[in-house]
Image (spheres, rainbow, N blue to C red):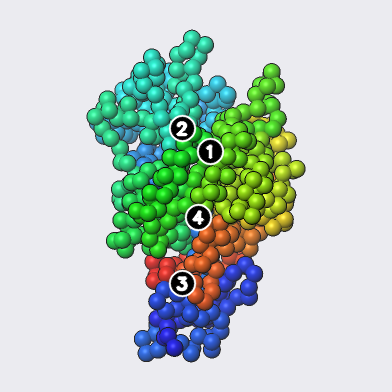
Amino acid sequence: MKKADKILYGGVIYTSYDKEAAEAVAIADGEFICVGTLADCEAYIGENTEMKDLSGKLVLPGLIDGHTHPITIAKTIWHVRMPDVTDKEELLATIREHAEKNPKEEVPYFYGECYHAETFGPEGPTKELLDSVISDRPARIQDFTDHACWYNSMAIDMLGVRDNSGHIGSPIGHAEVMRDESGEPTGWVLESGPDGDYGIYEKLGWYPPEGTEEESVGPFLDSLKEKGVICLMDGFTESENVMKLFYDLDKAGKLNMYYQGAAFIGSYDELEEGIANVRSWSEKYSTDHIGINTIKFFVDGTNEMGDSASLEPLKNDPSGTNYGMINATEEEMTKIMVRLNEEKIDLHLHIVCDRAFRVCCNAVENARKICGDEWSIYVTFCHCELVHPDDMARVADLGIMIDWSTHWAGGYFGEAAIEFLGRERWETMYDFTKMIEDGAVVGHSSDVFSYIEAHRANPFMGIQTTATRVDLEDPLDPEKYPGSVRPPSHAKLSVAQQIKGYTYNNAYRMRMLDKTGTIEEGKKANLVVLDKNIFEIPMEEIHTIDPVAVMFEGEYIK
């Protein structure tokens, strides 16, 4: 009989959402070889077995972040992080203050985070306004949602968009430069990723970190592991260099977690390129800890910018003809799914509004009919902020999976979407209760984009927020919303539902249940020991949980 390297006992071991808790586990060669009572595990004691008394502490399976952006975050390590303010004059004063603290000799390109869309309304900010507080160098202030930004005049000139001699690209397509009636760029740009600023970098002769440096991404990965996250899925894998980075970290024994990539496509026409990338990157960089077998596609934009795909005309459009933006037709989405099913490649879709959701539900239904018994891929809808009641039951019926960013549930994005969706629809957002009741697979994630919000990837912060519908840092006005609870209050999810989302459901969606997601004999020994029992402490204290130990494949990484 194989002898245990380690035995952990005397705890409350939450093995899975649907099984009784265990008292002890025995671990050998990085796997659980016994899960049960101490008496069960004692049969595996050898002369070198390490015995660890858990002193009654709660143990969970290793946590999984189902959608985040490690490289996009790593690229922001040089950004100027400013206090979160919404008042226009206070924002301008803050930018001026931080520009003085970070002179151009040290910070040749002032990239500040962040401003809120509601500060400027539907017309957006102007370059002249930013010029008034910083004009000695190019400057960009990032929107809170990371789906827009605000440039000063010098940056606009360096980018070459004033005279159309250049363009702004981004990981999620080409940016939309907002212009006034004369065609002059206003300084407000939608969907401009930091990669699009290369015109500025070239003219300055200065280049920021690419994000694929170990020292840039390391702090974020370490922060995840500190909180018990032993696996993540990349919201989109930006390049082959990203796969190589994780491969090199793993080969050097520095990764100590699982990484699942997702090749990005910006349109239906890029599908074959995306498939080729999945195949090539999988062949070159797959290990026991690294894999890629997913395509990522942005179906619409954001509700806060008014570029999401709505079933109703946007409220701020007096003509009643603006239904927002969608990046693919139902026919194109159906073709994407049928083609990926041929290749056995899964699909991850960015969907925020109800028309995008319905179009994609229709596409799944169409594709399943076309493929018949050959249908085998997993299709995940991420975000799904606004869903029409008629489409709720379709999720489980069609085998669609959901990815929800838990720390958004308390109103993180404020009220900006009300202008486009109306208050009545805004107050129905972020409700997954009916889907869960129907048996849908709902996994959880952080979807953080920069170091200024990286701390919000803490899963315990996310669990508390979705359990209470109150944001810890930016609560809604209690005068409007009693207790700062974001409507609808009935959409709160239980702690148990969320732990299932962070463990079993995410492992299922990522096709990793053979390795992780539960504590069972034969699975990898991934677990997190909590300093407080998440099921017993007050909801308002969940964010204070700080794991005392985290184990990845039988070895302590904390």
Q: CA distance from mark 4 to mark 1?
A: 19 Å
Amino acid found under the numbered disc labelled 4: Asp
The residue positioned 45% from the left and 29% from the top of the image is 174
Look at the numbered disc 3 and give the secondary structure of its residue. Answer: loop
477 and 387: which one is in front? 387
Q: Which residue is mark 3?
A: 525
Amino acid found under the numbered disc labelled 1: Phe
Does 77 appear above or below 23? Answer: above
Q: Which residue is mark 4?
A: 65
Q: CA distance from mark 2 to mark 1?
A: 9 Å
142 and 346: which one is in front? 346
Look at the numbered disc 2 and give the secondary structure of its residue. Answer: loop
Q: Which residue is mark 1?
A: 298
223 and 264: which one is in front? 264
* Label 3 close to label 1 by CB (< 8 Å): no
Characterize the local packing of mark 3: few (<14), some (14-19) or many (20 or more) Cα atoms within 10 angstroms: many
Amino acid found under the numbered disc labelled 2: Gly
Q: Which residue is mark 2?
A: 173
Percent position of residue 542, x then y: 57, 59
Nearer to us: label 4 or label 1: 1
Ranked by sequence position, the earlier of labels 4 and 1 is 4
Relative side of 248 to 27, left or right: left
Ranked by sequence position, the earlier of labels 3 and 4 is 4
Look at the numbered disc 4 and give the secondary structure of its residue. Answer: strand
Where's the C terminus, which quadrant? bottom left
Q: Is residue 54 visible?
A: no
